[in-house]
Image (cartoon, rainbow, N blue to C red):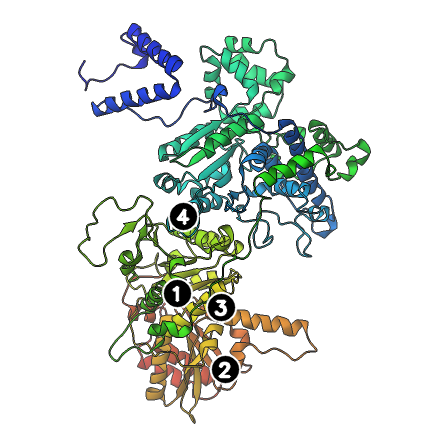
Amino acid sequence: MSAHDPLPSASLDLDPQETREWLDALSGVIETEGRNRAHDLLETVLDHARQAGIDMPFSATTAYVNTIPAEDEARCPGNIEIEERLRAYMRWNAMAMVVKANRHNPEDGGDLGGHIGSFASLAHMFGAGFNHFWHAESEGHGGDCIYFQGHVSPGVYARAYLEGRLTEEQLLHFRQEVDGKGLSSYPHPKLMPNFWQFPTVSMGLGPLMAIYQARFLKYLHARGIADTSNRKVWVFCGDGEMDEPESLGAIGLAAREKLDNLIFVVNCNLQRLDGPVRGNGKIVQELEGEFRGSGWNVIKLLWGSDWDPLLAKDKDGRMRKIMMDILDGDYQAMKANDGAFVRKNFFERDPRVAELVSKMTDEQIWALRRGGHDPQKVYAAYDRAVNHKGQPTVLLIKTVKGFGMGKAGEGKNTVHQTKKLTDDDIKYFRDRFNIPIPDSELPKIPFYKPSEDSPEMKYLHERRKALGGYLPSRRSRAEEQFTIPPLETFKAVLEPTAEGREISTTQAYVRFLTQLLRDKELGPRVVPILVDEARTFGMEGLFRQVGIYNPAGQQYTPVDKDQVMYYREDKAGQILQEGINEAGGMSSWIAAATSYSTSNRIMIPFYVYYSMFGFQRIGDLAWAAGDMQARGFLLGGTSGRTTLNGEGLQHEDGHSHILAGTIPNCVSYDPSFAHEVGVILHHGLKRMVENQENVFFYLTLLNENYAMPGLKQGTEEQILKGMYLLDEGQAGKPAVNLLGSGTILRESIAAKALLESDWGLTANVWSCPSFNELARDGQDAERFNMLHPLETPKVSFVTQQLQPFDGPVVASTDYMKNYAEQIRPFIPKGRSYKVLGTDGFGRSDFRSKLREHFEINRHYIVVAALKALAEEGKVPAAKVAEAIQKYGIKADKVNPLYA
């Protein structure tokens, strides 16, 4: 047979004797030299076959059994009996917390919600981690990062209650936070700033953020900023959560960069929120293929120790075949029924397999556990994971959703929504886990806590002491302190541009960043983050200056090596170059922006991207950043709906500031000039680095070049508040106030010239770097005045600025009208207020044509000003019609919103 001839199928074995000899030889190697040697031989043979041109289909899945054989398991050194009792108490208290919350105050809005089934399924996994693996921050250890599955928060609270970290009153106020006594529904650092580290209930974001967190720990170590060599990142996900694109979206990065500090634990209880994850398939096998194919170390834990004797007797693999053949939907049905059902629908599929359990009662069959409910098995899996080198590890652990809940929902489709239990359900739960609460007390559903001198409580505290302290725990301030250099340090962006010179605000940002990188103290803490657009933003000079982080260094010769600004990768590089990957860039930014908390190191991340691909594309991550109290700079380059003139509908941003305004601790600006960029960035450094305030800044930048006027001393505070007088009009003429931001402010400046030359009028031009900040200030003043009717009213900053200047107000921006509409209530009474904006889809054309299309250019500003003056009786209405005709405005064209 030629090497290129097709192989006979397994069902048409041409030489059974030869096949038998090969199998016997392999069995001999396994028996005498071990599994590892057999594995090496098989890999060598397969590689040789591929080299010979034999088409070998790759299978990334293994048998539906535990990855770690029973005889190879590391033994748990703890007291499993005590751990089981502690776990039972936590199960009870978690259940009681949720049920109590949903029995109280029905007249006050109904149910509070909560979840019992999720923690019930992974309590053993948490127990192993808390008791033996998860380090708190301590001297010599930076602490492990634990991304807790969002729906299991009651179980984490239940443990903290036993530890004395939470009070009974707090448990009684689960999901009742307004009065400051309660516990947040899910992990929320904003709501519990000393407890939760990572928000994870927006499913898929936890896995994604954790991968970049693990990578950032490696980055800190490589750059000599922090020793993170002994830290691990643990990520708990549900198998249903893995359907989120973000859950699997970055697993290739984790393998490529060999993140062996990363451990995923996928709780495979085979159920989503509404039903089976893969009723017609096998989610464990699917995930094994995904992760193994991406280069991860995969450990499957499917069967508890009770199955080991049965598997040992399964000499011909018939039971293993049944395990593989049964679909997840059927596995779920087995756990929703009883032992007799399991006997019939599992074991009796094959007479020889049925014989294996012929002497077992239905009760004993029912007691056969899935692997995730066996503490010894879980310990062994964790031990293997933490000691694996060179790859990230995923643990696929099979459990039962609602384990221990019985008829109240164990293994049923409804279990995720179960938050109310009957008295009989509660009694069953008490008996199932042997909770020492008498029948007489059961109606109260009391919390249970052993005495402090009990063996259980002593053990609980001893285990956490051995691991450095209690978890979860969050650091709210870094111990280190930095002083920001004075604003004058950045004079390169504060001074007027030389005659004949033009720059963009993007260039101003790069100049500011370059100066900051030169600072001996702050420079090393800067984290430039790019998503494959460095040359678009003029940042390619940083490649040579500070290098691009790559844990493998640069093993090739870059094609542009002969150029000054060549593409330089380095093991200690400072830039995080994420490729075409906005979600990855944002996740890296979050890791850096929260490093003050997770690593006790203040870092200063600058993430620059096309603005349209910012808040719109990663809005959920931006909200998570707010929850995590992130500190750093987001920069939306080539911003506005008419500036990125050739990119069209998908790229042009007219609403990112509206989205930014929805996040309470996001401070956003749309600067027009270089000096505004400098003042805002410097102020951001003061607030976030020097003062360690929990805010983050969003700035939109332009790639449009023009002359910069320079900073007018005394306007710094007004710039930061959102509005300052750029150019005052001539005295003695009818005046209008023209407001603008970003690139369109220049159209307002041009409109002022037209009003003077064509109509004999004048205008005050106001630069408004932030309508969002102006709106927040005005709303705060209104709230104060409503709640303090007898005190001197507060006056909004908009009113303060405009009050001394007569005339109506016209605002024009490169954003939707809603952006500038926010300040309408604060325009001085009796003044007309006209707003122009870019409502509608973007399109490609020259900037002048786009600004005409969206009706925000100088001509439309003049028409709006004349209309406002006419409404106030300052000019005849005929002047408006005359201007429309003079500037060739098509009055009857379709509204851009619908065009």
In the image, which is nearer the foreground, mark 3 or mark 4?
4
Whether label 3 touches label 2, CB < 8 Å? no
Q: Give the labeled residue for mark 1.
A: 700
Whether label 1 touches label 4, CB < 8 Å? no
Q: Give the labeled residue for mark 3.
A: 772
The amino acid pointed to by label 3 is Asn
Quarter of the image that includes the C terminus = bottom left
Residue 591: % across, % down? 45, 51
Instruction: Report how far apart the C-alphas of labels 2 and 1 lie in the structure.
Output: 25 Å
402 vs 821: above or below: above
Of the numbered discs 3 and 2, the one sitting upstream in the chain is 3
- Within 10 Å of disc 3 (Cα), the crowding (few <14, some 14-19, many 20+) is many
The amino acid pointed to by label 1 is Thr
123 vs 724: above or below: above
Of the numbered discs 3 and 4, the one sitting upstream in the chain is 4
Can the viewer see residue 892 in this picture?
no
Q: Left or right: 108 with respect to 526? A: right
User: What is the secondary structure assignment of the residue under circle 4?
Assistant: helix
Q: Left or right: 118 with respect to 105? A: left
Q: Any mark on residue 802, and which?
A: 2
Q: Give the labeled residue for mark 4.
A: 221
In this view, the residue in front, 377 or 581, is: 377
Of the numbered discs 1 and 3, the one sitting upstream in the chain is 1
Of the numbered discs 4 and 2, the one sitting upstream in the chain is 4
Q: Residue at x 34, y 67 (%)?
A: 515
Instruction: Report how far apart the C-alphas of labels 3 and 2 lie in the structure.
Output: 17 Å
